[in-house]
Image: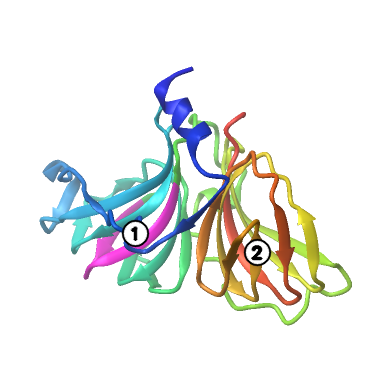
Amino acid sequence: MTEALKKVAAIPTVHRIMPNGVDGVGLSAWEAMDPATLAAGEPVQSGHLYDENEARGYSAGVWHCTAFDDAPGPYPVDEYMLLLEGQVVMALPDGTDVTINAGEAFVLPQGLDCQWKMPCDVRKIFMIVETDGRETSQNPSLVRVTKPALQTDASAGDAVASAQCVFHSADGRMQVLRRSFSQTLQGPLPSASQRLITVLAGEVRIGAEIFGPMQSCLVNAADRADWHIASGTTWIEAQYRSYL
């Protein structure tokens, strides 16, 4: 087993995501960006990886950086992000600007022609997956900036639980979903994916860990803990399927 694969197997089943990194450790300084990839600024970045499979181009964690603009070009990875602080503007070739503010989530697909502009410091939680270069033209979520609605649902209708997929990568290894629960659920909630979850409303207890609105966690694919999901709970989650 490679060292990268060992990292995935070793993480806790449920890991609370903290905006400033692990308590007592904080965020680590990351290497400087290549000036050739920048259009403006001299960004200073730091972060903490809560999970990584370097061999497969997957990582999830927290990132902080000072202002900068990227050079225009294709986005290098599939990336789901939830902004905790600051603002990002995605400039598209047709002249459209998509603005993402603190408290909003967005997804950028690998290969999207765009320019990242960051007028101020930004802090975000993220999940990154490098795809295998499959054809993207048949999937509309792969030729746009996806901004999932984070308003909470009053009800999931007649269903005990409902799910809406807002992004699905070309190779199927990454997707982003909104989940809503109209009734209380208890018991294990097994999954074959690494799951980065942010609660939007309500409360979920996974094992001994409790998560409320705008609190985030990383749940290992091997999780077998008992879940208690309160009625009226809504969350957004990014999933990474390592086996594809």
Q: Is residue 112 visible?
A: no
The crowd level at tag 1 (other Cα within 10 Å; few <14, some 14-19, many 20+) is few
Render colour scheme:
rainbow
Q: Position of residue 12 (x, y in %)?
A: 52, 44
Q: Main secondary structure of the magenta part?
A: strand
Residue 222 to residue 197: above or below: above
Give the spatial CA distance, label 1 vs label 2. Answer: 21 Å
Residue 73 to residue 183: above or below: above
Span shown in magenta: 114-127
- The image's mark for residue 23 is 1
As drawn, is 242 to the left or to the right of 130?
right
As drawn, is 162 to the left or to the right of 114?
right
Residues 133 and 32: in front is 32
Q: Position of residue 206 (x, y in %)?
A: 64, 58
Q: Amino acid at mark 2?
A: Arg
Tell me which label, 1 or 2, sits earlier in the chain: 1
Residue 118 among magenta residues = yes
Q: Position of residue 160 (x, y in %)?
A: 84, 67
Where does label 2 land, which residue? 205
Tell whether label 2 touches label 1 (CB within 8 Å): no
- The image's mark for residue 154 is none
Residue at left offset 84%, top offset 75%: 157
Q: Position of residue 35 (x, y in %)?
A: 12, 45
The crowd level at tag 2 (other Cα within 10 Å; few <14, some 14-19, many 20+) is some
Residue at left offset 34%, top offset 59%: 23
What secondary structure is marked by label 2? strand
As drawn, is 112 to the left or to the right of 71?
right
Residues 152 and 225: in front is 225
Residues 58 and 112: in front is 58
Residue at left offset 32%, top offset 71%: 87
Residue 25 among magenta residues = no
